[in-house]
Amino acid sequence: MRLLSAIFLILLLTIPGICTAQTRNDIQPHILSMRERAEVMDRWTEDRLENLVPDLMRREGIDMWVLVAREYNEDPVLLTMLPATWQSSRRTTILIFHDPGNGDPVERFAVARYDIGFFDTQWFPEEEPDQWKRFGEIVREKNPERIGINISEHFAAADGISHTDYMDLRNSLSPELRDRIVSAENLSIGWLETRTANEITVYSQINRIAHNIVAEGLSERVITPGVTTTRDVQWWYRERIRDSNMTAWFHPSVTVYRSESPEHSGDFSSGSESDVIMPGDLIHVDFGIEYLGLATDTQRNAYVLRPGETEAPQGLRDALALANRLQDILTDEFRTGRTGNEILLSALNKAEQEGINATIYTHPIGYQGHGAGPTIGLWDQQGGVPGKGDYPLYANTAHSIELNAEVYVPEWNRNVRILLEEDAIFNGETIRYTDGRMKDFYLIPRQMR
């Protein structure tokens, strides 16, 4: 009963009207217990295996998909198919999907020493001690036309089979069957990037949790100007995430920009030094959590008021509005079937036409923070990204809309980069932010409205 109440609360908070209303930063969304999370995640996984895998296999024309992993050297795709209570694979784990055709259901087998729950166990060592021999027998019996395995030049998450496992797989098959081995790259990416209706619904709540923590850290509850350092805030975020029984998929970054500081170089390959936060500073945060198996990625900004100020300088507010405009230009270019490089080129051209000095580095998000799917620019590759940028955009995928606009701020007499990142869902026709986006700076201290 408790689990049902918790899930109802999650669904309730994702109804559009209620989502809009809940903007208070002092309301902490409900976070499920570890046991409740496992139950939800297993239900999601079973639904995905039952309904998503068949569609993807038929889309890619692969009638057998084989995933192999050994304990502590797991295929990233296989890890997402295991029960939530499994922290890793056990010994050598072989998963097989087989589409018999004629509209019949896709079969799921496990050639493994332990019961994996979602899969029909097909290896019994007391009958056949050799695991790979048993695997070969199953493949020969099913006689597939195309055997997909997870190998990929450009996508690390779709390149999960190790050399040893690959050789064992090949050696267990006849020469005729070996010739049917193909890359399951697009099938793996499709599995990783596609979000189901249940996941999309709850993703809004997951982002709400992340946004509330970001807002709390960018407030006087955490920051005392003249005392608190950017490193203090970074570690406060790490502790806050841990205290909430969640994890961070990267160490948060907290950076200050101020009128007398030199212009940011645009090189994001190294972290900033620790600075004492002072009045007049623009604070930038890059922050991400993992919850219910899904990742978030958020970049937001706060302004520290000087004595007598009640809002950020007009030049900074105008710069934020221009960065919001750049977000619109980019998301307007999302079209099913377009590649990441096509979206990037078109968005940058339109930004240039509007006089926006833009840098776009948007990426998929989901099981991993930097997820599988079309990469739309990298901060140091604005001419396109070979391989990852050539992958097409599909419906029901999540993306981290990450970019910056460089704008001249008169009050500071120099250019300032406004860096933003917000997670969004593309449904095949339109894109929406999972929990809104930043259109106004957080203010420290908060002002009465």
Image: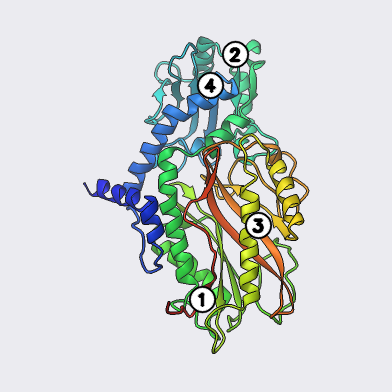
- The residue that mark 4 highlights is 132
- The residue that mark 3 highlights is 326
Determine the residue positioned at 47% across, 75% down. 219
Identify the secondary structure beneath mark 3.
helix
Mark 2 vs 1, N-terminal side: 2
View extreme (left): residue: 1
Say whether residue 149 is left or right of residue 115.
right
User: Disc 3 vs disc 1: Cβ atoms closer than 8 Å?
Assistant: no
Q: CA distance from mark 1 to mark 4?
A: 61 Å
Q: Amino acid at mark 3?
A: Leu
Q: CA distance from mark 3 to mark 4?
A: 53 Å
Q: CA distance from mark 4 to mark 2?
A: 20 Å
Q: Amino acid at mark 2?
A: Glu
Closer to us: 214 or 23: 23
* 430 versus 419 height, above or below: above
How busy is the neighbourhood of tag 2: few (under 14 within 10 Å), some, or many (20 plus)?
some
User: Disc 2 vs disc 1: Cβ atoms closer than 8 Å?
Assistant: no
Q: Closer to the observer: label 4 or label 2? A: 2
Mark 3 vs 1, N-terminal side: 3
Say whether residue 97 is left or right of residue 277.
left
Q: Amino acid at mark 1?
A: Leu
Mark 1 vs 4, N-terminal side: 4
View extreme (right): residue: 383
Residue 416 image point, x, y percent: 70, 71
Determine the residue positioned at 72% across, 41% down. 342
Mark 4 vs 2, N-terminal side: 4
* 251 versus 45 height, above or below: below
- The residue that mark 2 highlights is 145
How busy is the neighbourhood of tag 4: few (under 14 within 10 Å), some, or many (20 plus)?
many
Residue 314 image point, x, y percent: 62, 76
- The residue that mark 1 highlights is 443
Q: CA distance from mark 3 to mark 1?
A: 23 Å
